[in-house]
Image: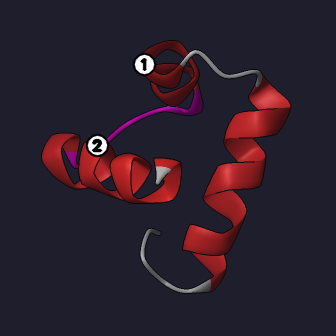
Amino acid sequence: MILLELKHYIKQHQRVTLNDIQLHFDLSEEAAKGLLAPLLQQGHIH
């Protein structure tokens, strides 16, 4: 579920920083990077 929310958040804001994601979803840097990794690998984000 959080991956879908993350994709939606990025799509809505178009440009977000790792810090934006950490603050919005209340995640550590490592957790945010872990969630972004599959989205990057699958080409959903650049």
Looking at the picture, does residue 9 appear above or below residue 36? above
Q: Is residue 14 left or right of residue 19?
A: left
State the CA–CA distance, disc 2 to disc 1. Answer: 9 Å
Q: Earlier in the sequence, mark 2 or mark 1?
A: 2
Q: Is residue 42 left or right of residue 46?
A: right
Tell whether position 26 is magenta: no
What residue do we see at 77% from left, 51% from top?
34
Q: Is residue 39 above or below residue 31?
A: below
Determine the image quadrant of residue 44.
Answer: bottom left
Residue 16 appears left or right of 19: left
Q: Residue at x 56, y 86 (%)?
A: 42
> Where does the magenta region start and end?
14-18
Q: Amino acid at mark 1?
A: His
Q: Mark 2 falls on what kind of element?
A: helix
What residue is shown at x 68% (from left), y 38% (from top)?
A: 32
Q: Which residue is mark 2?
A: 9
Task: Give the SS element for disc 1.
Answer: helix
